[in-house]
Amino acid sequence: MSEDDNKNKAPKKGLLGRMFGSKSSRQDDSVSDSDRADREKQTPVSDDPGKSQPVEKSGDEQGQPRSWFGRLKKGLTKSSSRLGEGISGIFTKRRLDEEALQELEDILVQADLGVETAMRITDRLAASRLDKNISPQEVREVLASEVEKVLEPVARPLEIDDDAKPFVILMAGVNGAGKTTTIGKLSRKLSDEGKKVMLAAGDTFRAAAVEQLQIWGERTGAPVVTRAVGSDAASLAFEAMKEAKEAGVDVLMMDTAGRLQNKSHLMDELKKIVRVMKKQDENAPHAVLLVLDATTGQNAVSQAEVFGEAVDVTGLVMTKLDGSARGGILVAIADRFGLPVHFIGVGEGVEDLQPFSASEFARAIAQT
Ligand SMILES: Nc1nc2c(ncn2[C@@H]2O[C@H](COP(=O)(O)OP(=O)(O)OP(=O)(O)O)[C@@H](O)[C@H]2O)c(=O)[nH]1
Ligand SMILES: [Mg+2]
């Protein structure tokens, strides 16, 4: 029995458990991605969206915030309340002096915002308020506005070029990041916009992965191109594009296996998929979306780096911002890579994918 089979048999937690449950074990930055991947395999991961998802809507009846913004805010509580407490601790009845600025910089860095952003925030405060009294609320407002400034240029919608038939989206990301789930959610979104969607089950390593995508396909009314387990993912990509063209499909989304960044042969396969797609259409894939799990902290930065070296990543989706997320990392990634952030995932349900908004995210982080 493969480890993946074990993964599928793991007990499934309820929504509450998934949102506030045992993800704290993932908060450790020192964990390598291979460690993380091993742990993912023990983590309850639902490969059956039809059964384990909170049915088709945002929020639920168990006292959880209903709006996606409420869930984003709640998900970011871990980052933001630590930040908020830190800021209150430093600035309650205290002048803004060099020592306070240094302390602030430290907590901003600890919140994963990245050194550059942290310095910009402290520089801005120093320029206007040095040696004056400042309230925690004022500091939070500066934080929100600086975070928004970093995120604003990257908050870009995913634009589907109608002239590309099909418009091909390749989904990449490490094991458990949320690729397959994001394809399912996007399939619903695009179908709702009237687009004809087709899915390709490019994770040909696991039977469960193919089934998981098929369930999403059924659920969102999108045909799914599959091949036998163990088939070459690149030839599947080629054939899926051909099928999509013949069927007049608008958007073809290709799932891929979870790729560990330290496994160069897996990166090579991703490159091969891209090469083969170009034989059908030199502009394909038209979008390569890197899916990053917000609960993984600093690991997400190295994932963005390694995937970006292997393929031409065109945009990001950050998932699990409803969990005990380390949302600050999105700020560091935006600052460093400047890649468009198209969507955020705020739950496991089909509706839990939201266009990324810089100001809302900044407000949720800074709790303003
Ligand atoms: N809470 C929450 N869970 C999510 C979100 N997105 C995905 N998940 C869950 O994360 C787990 C992994 O998601 P998958 O879509 O299977 O991840 P993957 O990247 O396809 O993983 P592999 O196929 O193993 O490489 C599943 O249990 C999903 O339901 C999200 O935005 N919020
Ligand atoms: Mg998958």
Image (cartoon, grey):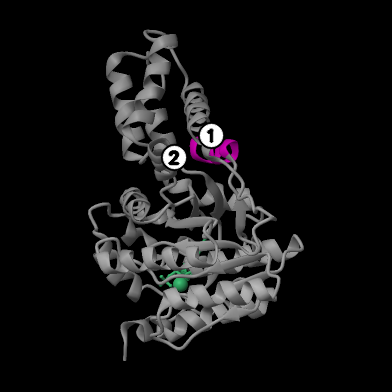
Instruction: Identify the residue at horizontal 46%, vertical 88% (top origin).
Output: 228
Q: Which residue is mark 1?
A: 153
Rendered image quadrant of residue 31: bottom left
Q: Which secondary structure lies at badge 2? A: helix
Rendered image quadrant of residue 128: top left
- Counting from the top left corner in percent of width and height, residue 85 is at 41, 35
| Residue 253 in the figure: left or right of residue 190 | left
Residue 326 to residue 87: above or below: below
Question: Looking at numbered disc 1 in the image, what kind of residue is underneath it?
Answer: Pro
Q: Are marks 2 and 1 in contact (CB under 8 Å)?
A: yes
Q: Which residue is mark 2?
A: 334
- The numbered dot on residue 183 is none
Rendered image quadrant of residue 220: bottom right
Instruction: Identify the residue at horizontal 59%, vertical 69% (top origin).
Output: 184
Closer-to-camera residue (216/193) = 193
- Counting from the top left corner in percent of width and height, residue 74 is at 53, 50
Closer-to-camera residue (133/157) = 157
- Counting from the top left corner in percent of width and height, residue 120 is at 39, 23
Closer-to-camera residue (26/156) = 156
Question: Looking at numbered disc 2 in the image, what kind of residue is underneath it?
Answer: Ala
Can residue 263 be seen in this snapshot?
Answer: no
Q: Which secondary structure lies at badge 1? A: helix
Residue 259 to residue 110: above or below: below
